[in-house]
Amino acid sequence: MDNGQIADRLEAFAAMLELAEANGYTIRAYRRAAELIRGTAVPVEALVRSGRVRELRGIGPGIEARLRELIETGEIAELAELERELSPALIGFGRYLGLGAQRSVEIARALDVRTADELREAVVAGRLRDVPGIGPKREAQIVEALAREGEPRPARGLLLNQAWELVGGIAEALGGVVAGDVRRWRDSCEHLAVVAPPAALAQFPQLPQSSLSSSRASG
């Protein structure tokens, strides 16, 4: 596993921790570690296997343990679990309804739904009243927010779930990673960006998303 691949997984872990509203210090630590590893000249996998990775400034025992797990198994178990549990589209839709990430996950679990569309259908069907902690007043607020979904919005940004679908599709097609406001998990995304190899630039005009993204994104 090369340094870029290791850095990508640490960045993904940081992003999912942020989505799960984890400790900000931990999130920043993983992002700094990813940047450090991406810019390190020597193979970090070799440092991990030799027990020397903590010679890199900013790599503490917690991150070392994650790196060892990643190198030895090919994945970070907690990241895999978060990716199964936290749908960016569902969390983005929950935020639009006035719900925090953790509350969105709790409601999704209670209703046995996994996507934004399934959550929308559950709200319309009146199933929120079956969720512990959701009283009539809170349900009314969520239903009211959902009713505003079709209202015209300022053109200055995309909702997180819409931006993630657009930029994530481009990143996957180009072999790149999501960047800009989507990576920062902003509720309204104006700066849509993908970090990809220079050779991928020629492929961008052929993508079906190119006409939409070029009119909505910069950078």
Image (spheres, grey):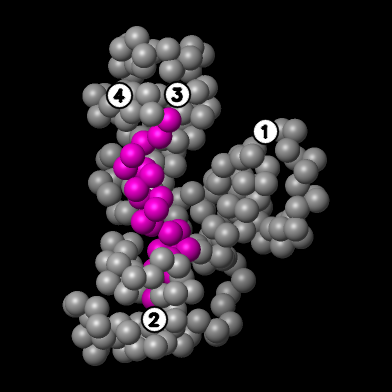
With 25 as the anchor, is 178 left or right in this view? right
Q: Is residue 54 visible?
A: yes
Q: Which residue was labeled with disc 3? A: 37
For image coordinates 36% across by 14% down, the residue present is 49
Disc 3, SS: helix
- 113 relative to 58, above or below: below
> In terms of sequence position, does the residue under pointer 3 or pointer 2 come before the other?
3
User: What type is the residue that disc 1 sits on?
Assistant: Pro
The image's mark for residue 122 is 2
Q: Which residue was labeled with disc 1? A: 197
User: What type is the residue that disc 3 sits on?
Assistant: Ile
- Local crowd size for mark 1, using a 10 Å CA cut-off: few (<14), some (14–19), many (≥20): few
Q: CA distance from mark 3 to mark 2?
A: 43 Å
- 140 relative to 97, above or below: below
For image coordinates 62% across by 71% down, the residue present is 155
- 5 relative to 22, above or below: above
Q: Which residue was labeled with disc 4? A: 64
- Local crowd size for mark 4, using a 10 Å CA cut-off: few (<14), some (14–19), many (≥20): some
Q: Which residues are magenta?
A: 74-97
With 28 as the anchor, is 168 left or right in this view? right
